[in-house]
Amino acid sequence: MGFPQRLKALRKDRKLSQETLAKEVGIDRTSISHYENSEENDERIPRLDTLEKIADFFDVTYDFLLGRTDEALVKEDQAVYKVTPAAAHAYPEEIQHFLLTLPDMLLQVPDEEREAVIRELEHTVQTRIKNKTRS
């Protein structure tokens, strides 16, 4: 079962219309329709930020949404989502590599330090964004 079928099944299990799901994840209804009705050989995969919103809304992993696993729920000890190549593909090459390797790198950091590393990374990125907007 690929992304179109998983998305449709999750939506129907929750008895949601395409319109309601679209509002919940902040996209338009036609996007939901395109995702659900795309052909297996031409699956339309949302951008990473949209995929994240859909996964968060349904409380499932990216891999489950994309049909790579049948394990839907995020395990308690697996706090970091795995980013799939299909999801990362929407970004420039250097960002793709970073997105695909970051989760594994973070899992190698000792538990007691991981949260601090994530906060530092977020702070660094936010600082660069602020500095760029001031320029």
Image (cartoon, grey):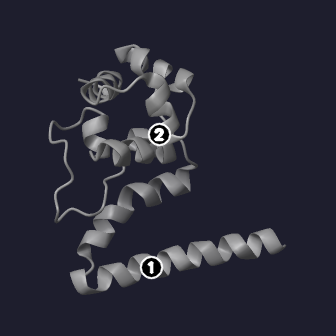
* Residue 119 circle label: 1
Using the rendered image of the protein, determine whether residue 84 is visible from the camera's viewpoint.
Answer: no
Residue 53 x/y as whole percent:
44, 46
Which quarter shows the N terminus? top left
* Residue 51 circle label: none
Residue at 58%, 72% in the rendered image: 125
Count every numbered label the image shows and give the total: 2
Horizontally, is 118 left or right of 11 in the view? right
Q: Mark 2 points at which residue?
A: 24
Residue 69 x/y as whole percent:
18, 38
Tell me: residue 54, above or below residue 17. below
Which quarter shows the C terminus? bottom right
**Badge 2 amino acid:** Glu
Q: What element carries label 2?
A: helix
Residue at 71%, 74% in the rendered image: 130
Q: Quadrant of the rendered structure where residue 111 is?
A: bottom left
Frontmost of labels 2 and 1 is 2
Residue at 36%, 27% in the rendered image: 16
Q: Is mark 1 on a helix, strand or loop?
A: helix
Residue nearest the observer in this picture, 12 or 88: 12
Horizontally, is 126 left or right of 5 in the view? right
Residue 62 x/y as whole percent:
32, 44
Q: Residue furthest right?
A: 135
